[in-house]
Structure formats: structure tokens, C-alpha cells
Image (cartoon, helix red, strand yellow):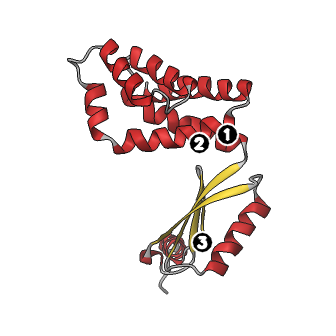
Amino acid sequence: MAKLVSKTYGDALFELALESGQEDALFEEAKQMLEIVQTNEDLAKMMNHPKIVIEEKQKIIEKIFEGRASREMTGLLMMIIAKGHYNEFDSVLEYFITQVKEYKKIGTARITSAMELSLMQKDAIRRKLLDTTDYVQFEMIYETDPSLIGGIVIRIGDRVVDGSVKSRLERLTSELSKIKLQMP
């Protein structure tokens, strides 16, 4: 159900953004709203409190975001509150942000390496990803994981390229375990 809510409202916001030519403005605003929603625990508690009626929740949101958020974004939030889906607002924003990134051909690459990469290595990876994908820009997220031993693992969406020594050793171990030795 949560996925359906985020897709329904996220698609509606995306269509509105495209129709009105506001994809860049609403994209930036969605990122800011997402940060506010994810970091403000008191707001979440209040919006999810069962004893606060929907109309009161909407008045609170109007006061908080009046003059600070676009009419489109506050309208979406009001509709989500009216339907009792405030706890899904962050997933709606995340879905919308992903849609805009895909539309603008901005990829997100998560690079995990055994040790910290140099600036030259990071630049080479970014250039290689731009050359081998349809994306025109990448948001790069770098992590280190010493258990990889060496090499790197690249994740872009649901695609994974695993060039780590750890996975190579695991594959080799698996292949060796399948070999049956015959003793004379």
C-alpha cells in the first residue's frame, strides 16, 4: 500500500511539474521538504497523533509552510493529510525526486571500495560511468568496506557491478567446492 501511495502522489506531482515547467523548482523544493520531514520528529508525532483531527493538522501545516513552500507542494501535503497518509509523505517526495532525476538523466552511483579512493580514481570512475550509461550527470556516494579486500562494488539503482576481491574469492570457493576429486 505504501508503494501505491508514493507512486500515485509522486506521479501526480511529477505530471504537474512537467505540465507547468516547474520540474527544477519543485525538485529543489522536494529535497528541502524531505529534509524537513525526516529531521523534525515533533512534526511527525503531531501529524500522526490520532487525537488531532485532520483539519487541525492542515491548519498547522498552513502556518508552518505559508510563504515558505509553493502552492503545489502545500496543496499536495494538504491532500495527503486529508487522506490520512502523512506518514507516507517522505516516500512520496523520494519517489518524485527519483522521477525527476530519471527525467533529467541524473544517476546515483554508490561506490564501495576496500579503502579510500583518490580524487583521480573517483574522477576516472565518474567519467567511465558517464561513458557507459545514458546518464548525463551522476551523484556519487563513496563508502569504504575493508572486508572487500580490494576492488570496488558499484550500485546504480538495482544494478550492481561487483569487482571486489571478496566476491571473486567467494566465486572461486564455490567453483572449487563443486569439483569432485577422484582418488586412485
- Residue 5 lies, in percent from the top left, at 48, 24
Residue designated by label 1:
24
Q: Amino acid at mark 3?
A: Gly
The tag on residue 55 is none
Residue designated by label 3:
163
User: Callout 2: helix, strand or loop?
Assistant: helix
Mark 1 burial class by Cα count in 10 Å: few <14, some 14-19, many 20+: few
State how far apart marks 2 and 3 are (Cα): 34 Å
Which of the marked residues, 2 or 3, is nearer the chain's N terminus?
2
* 22 on left or right of 36: right
Quadrant assignment, res 133? bottom right
Of badges 3 and 1, the one in the foreground is: 1
Mark 3 burial class by Cα count in 10 Å: few <14, some 14-19, many 20+: some
Q: Of 129 and 184, which appears nearest the observer?
A: 129
- Residue 32 lies, in percent from the top left, at 50, 42
User: Callout 1: helix, strand or loop?
Assistant: helix
The tag on residue 28 is 2
Which of the marked residues, 3 or 1, is nearer the chain's N terminus?
1
Q: Amino acid at mark 2?
A: Glu
Label 1 with label 2: CB-CB less than 8 Å: yes
Q: Total label count? A: 3
Q: Is residue 26 above or below residue 153?
A: above
Q: Of 174 and 141, which appears nearest the observer?
A: 141
Task: Please report the residue visible at 67 percent of the width from the left and 25 percent of the height from the top.
Answer: 15
Task: Please report the residue visible at 23 percent of the width from the left and 19 percent of the height from the top.
Answer: 50
Q: Amino acid at mark 1?
A: Asp
Task: Please report the residue visible at 48 percent of the width from the left and 80 percent of the height from the top.
Answer: 149
* 37 on left or right of 12: left
State how far apart marks 1 and 2 are (Cα): 6 Å
